[in-house]
Image (cartoon, rainbow, N blue to C red):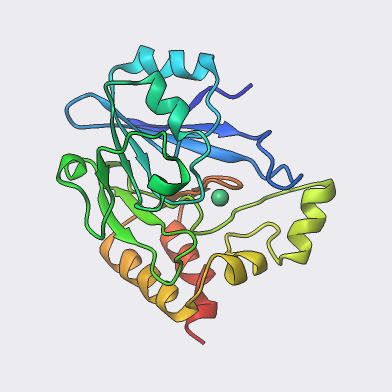
Amino acid sequence: MAGLRKLDDGLWVVDHRDFSVGGLRLGTRSTLVRRAGGSLVLVAPGPLAETDLAEIRALGELSDVVVPNQLHNLFCVAVAEAFPAAKVYAVPAIRAKQPRLRIDEELGDTVPGGLADTFEMLPLDGARRVDERLLFHASTRTLVGVDVAFNIRSATGLLRFAMWLNDGNDKLCMTRLGKSQYLDDHRAAARSIDRACDAFDFDRLVVSHGEVYEGGAREALREAYAFGRR
Ligand SMILES: [Fe+2]
């Protein structure tokens, strides 16, 4: 049973642990943040159950939905329909991938004015197939980076084997497959990670696959992209 899990003041996640990609139980994660004005913003919505939606509604008005990369787009239409008054922000490629989604504003290289009181934002460069925007929530010292890295811990069975092939078990990393499929320019990606680590004083990293990285996430993310500096 999923449900909202509180990580910090004004910060929750929903862990969708049963979500599978290509037969692999990789899981995914939705992130919910309380804005300064009291309303809520949902980032990278996953397969939220009715009970999850009810929990969100019980916390207050959902004013914004953010689709911060082009791969995590399967559930944004359902969420936008469930919250018809919410403003929807998405990376440009989502228009073609989810033509039924109403997009109020496309995400560019800088944070949209409507979200600037909640997040700082930088793009992950060198990753055209992902087109990720990294979102920093200063009051909880949290970086939300959906596919910027994997943090699969204590996997068993097929997932452990797949992660072994991918050099991705029990550490924060970009997997072998991720490096080849997600990243088209390793050096540009590493430079943008360094830029984000210099600009944002985060201690926690919320990724969508694996565990939330708690404590020392900035150093761990820098290390995870060492391959792009060699
Ligand atoms: Fe992903």
Judged from this view, the residue extending furthest toward the bottom is 230
- Residue 29, position as x, y percentages in the image: 53, 38
Of residues 101 and 203, the one drawn nearer to the viewer in this rendering: 101
Q: Taking 22 as reference, is 226 left or right?
A: left
- Residue 163, position as x, y percentages in the image: 74, 58
- Residue 226, position as x, y percentages in the image: 51, 77
Residue found at x 48% / y 59%? 130
- Asked whether residue 98 is in view, the answer is yes
Vertical comparison of 187 with 127: above or below: below
Residue found at x 53% / y 68%? 224
- Residue 83, quarter of picture: top left
Of residues 60 and 212, the one drawn nearer to the viewer in this rendering: 60
Vertical comparison of 59 with 177: above or below: above
Q: Taking 74 as reference, is 117 left or right?
A: left
Vertical comparison of 102 with 173: above or below: above
Task: Point out the image quarter for the N terminus.
Answer: top right
Q: How many labels does the image show?
A: 0
- Residue 39, position as x, y percentages in the image: 24, 24
Residue found at x 40% / y 53%? 93
Q: Taking 117 as reference, is 222 left or right?
A: right
- Asked whether residue 6 is in view, the answer is no
Residue found at x 72% / y 42%? 25
